[in-house]
Amino acid sequence: MKDILRPILELLVVLPGLLLGYFPVKTYLKQSPGRLAAWLFPLMACLCIGSGLACYRLHASTVFALAGVALAAVCLYTRTLTISLWKSGTIALSVCAVFACVNSLSRAVSAAIIRNLQLPPDGPWLCLGACVFYNAVCWVIVLAAYYPATHTVRAMVEDDNFAQTWYVFWVLPLAFILLNLFMIPRYQSTLQTSRVLQGYIVLSSALLVFMFCFNAVFLLMATSLNRNAKLQQENQFLSMQQQRYENLRTAIEEARQARHDMRHQLNQISALAEAGDLENLKSYLAKTVSRIPNLDMCFCENRAADSVVGYYCAMAKRDEIPFRARLDLPETLPVDEIDMCLVLSNLLENALEASLRTAPGRRHIELTACVHADRILLIEVENAFDGEINEKNGVFRSSKRRENGIGIQSVTRIAEKTGGTSTFTHQNGTFTAKVMLCG
């Protein structure tokens, strides 16, 4: 009976690893946690038990069985999440790397138990005591990692600013996994040598400690980078508000000057009318009307949205692009204002760039935003575009500069994060973006 349990216990460590992987991505599940656990964990438990029994019957090592079960768990894990494959795959690799280090340490513990008790190395699996140690350490790691995984790591996963971080971090856990595989001795008896066993214990323990240290350093670096990115975004929004304030002050000054000159203008108009000089009267009235400033200074009650829209409205007027905005947004929104500003700034900047590449006669930008059912924010931006659309697999990609935007893909991620949707269509030379954010 003990021999049957040994390979099964070696494979059952996939269950705590799977649980650890789900801690930071709970909000990205495609189905409820209870429903997911009801079928996923029994399925993986049956797969581990079946693979363990097969290893027992064939008297084979669990290395390949563990690799197959872990691969199946990773595939199911990534398929049950709505986040990108880079993020989910990197989290899965990180968990596998930590548990691979624990596996090496458990192998050393198994060799030490067999050597001290002078037990015969009668199987290709860990001894029963080492299997219990293996599972116990894995569950202790899961319990210890619960708080940082559900807070710090989750915040990093939900942050869309530094998605490129996930494109490089996978190298680190993969290197640890390969290193632990390389350390596996060809023969179990190799570890029975005193010096080899001591060195193996030190090396496997050091790898586990280094793995935790590298993960901690990465979290600190990512947190610092994300904090700097948020400060940069806030500075950009403050710059928009400053520009908006300057435009409003200029318009107010022009209106004040116009009111001051109104008496002189009326006297001139009266003189031309008394003289019956209709041509000069018409010309003078046309010049006077052209000097009256546009006093459409307020787009909505929400200051954040008004600042962003006002900023891009001024840029559009500078480039002689017709800009039309219909905003019905209250002072307090049901969604996060930072998310709303990011969506607006990205969509309007894309529309502005597209308009500059369009024939002057066809240029236009139309923005509509309103709150629906007290908890849904609807945003629609429409603009003409004569250029070539960079589309791949139904996804429109932004070609604008990277330092002042996070792209159309980020707009989609923000919408999905709030439980909303986003659609982008290009038809008959008109590009339309529709975004729904939920509170």
Image (cartoon, rainbow, N blue to C red):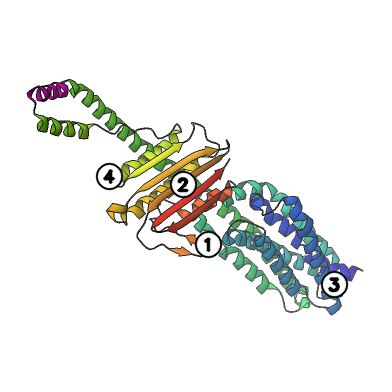
Dot 3: few (<14), some (14–19), or many (≥20) neighbours within 10 Å? some
- Figure disc tally: 4
> Marks 1/3: CA distance?
38 Å
**Residue 167: which numbered mark, if any?**
1
Q: Is mark 4 on a helix, strand or loop?
A: helix
SS under mark 3: helix
Q: Label 1 sits on what residue type? A: Tyr
Q: Image quadrant for the C terminus?
A: top right
Q: How far apart, in angstroms, are the residues tagged by discs 4 and 2?
A: 22 Å
Q: Identify residue for label 4.
A: 318
Which numbered mark, 4 or 2, is in the foreground of this view? 2
Q: Tags 1 and 4 in contact by the CB under 8 Å rule?
A: no
In the rendered view, would you say 38 is above or below 111?
above
Q: What residue type is labelled 3?
A: Leu
Q: Is residue 285 visible?
A: yes
Residues rendered magenta in the picture: 264-276
- The residue to which callout 3 is attached is 53
Q: Are marks 4 and 2 in contact (CB under 8 Å)?
A: no
- Under mark 4, the amino acid is Arg
Q: Earlier in the sequence, mark 1 or mark 4?
A: 1
